[in-house]
Amino acid sequence: MTLWYNNWMNEIADKTKIPVRLSKAEIKNLKVSVSSLDPYASLYLFGSRTDVTKRGGDIDILIISKNIKKRDLRDIRWNFFEEFGEQKIDIVTDDGSAQTPFVEIVFPKAVKI
């Protein structure tokens, strides 16, 4: 992983216990889907679902993986929809190098799930 990713990992390591607005079953479904594609991937929730005082909102996921590609995201969504029904899920992937300014912005506020 890159230095950028390692620095952010150290900063958010304590944030993994923060409550989020996803059920344990939803988190497990996402983790199983992602780990079946890359057992070394890291999964983060960002956006409104990280704020327990809010209601509603789509599910925003960031996956840090060198192996998961855009074509794999369909399978992750499909597995989720089969168990919980269709919902708005935005999934962003990055290989750990903060390829886009968007990832640089959301990663510091993301919660590891």
Image: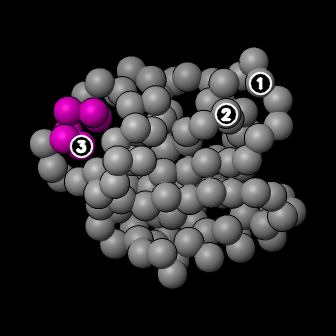
First to last magenta residue range: 4-9
Label pair 1/3, CB-CB below 8 angstroms: no
Q: Identify residue for label 2.
A: 48
Task: Describe residue 81's horizontal placement relative to residue 42 as left or right.
Answer: right
| Residue 100, image x, y percentages | 34, 54
Q: CA distance from mark 1 to mark 3?
A: 28 Å
Task: Describe residue 1's horizontal placement relative to residue 19 as left or right.
Answer: left
Identity, as a three-letter code, of the amino acid under mark 1: Lys
In the rendered structure, find residue 54 and report the number of the disc placed on it: 1
Kindly state the secondary structure of the residue where label 1 is placed: loop
Q: Is residue 24 magenta?
A: no
Kindly state the secondary structure of the residue where label 3 is placed: helix
Q: Identify residue for label 3.
A: 5
Tell how many labels.
3
Label pair 2/1, CB-CB below 8 angstroms: yes
Kindly state the secondary structure of the residue where label 2 is placed: helix
Q: CA distance from mark 2 to mark 3?
A: 23 Å
Please determine whether, in this image, residue 87 is positioned above or below residue 11: below
Mark 3 surroundings within 10 Å by alpha-carbon count, few (fewer than 14), some (14 through 19), many (20 or more): some
Identity, as a three-letter code, of the amino acid under mark 3: Tyr
Q: What secondary structure is the magenta-colored segment mainly?
A: helix
Answer with mark 2 or mark 3, whichever residue precedes in sequence.
3
Please determine whether, in this image, residue 30 is positioned above or below residue 49: below
Furthest toward the front, the residue is 101
Answer with mark 1 or mark 3, whichever residue precedes in sequence.
3
Quarter holding residue 13: top left
Identity, as a three-letter code, of the amino acid under mark 2: Ser
Q: Is residue 5 magenta?
A: yes
Mark 2 surroundings within 10 Å by alpha-carbon count, few (fewer than 14), some (14 through 19), many (20 or more): some
Quarter holding residue 48: top right
| Residue 37, image x, y percentages | 45, 72
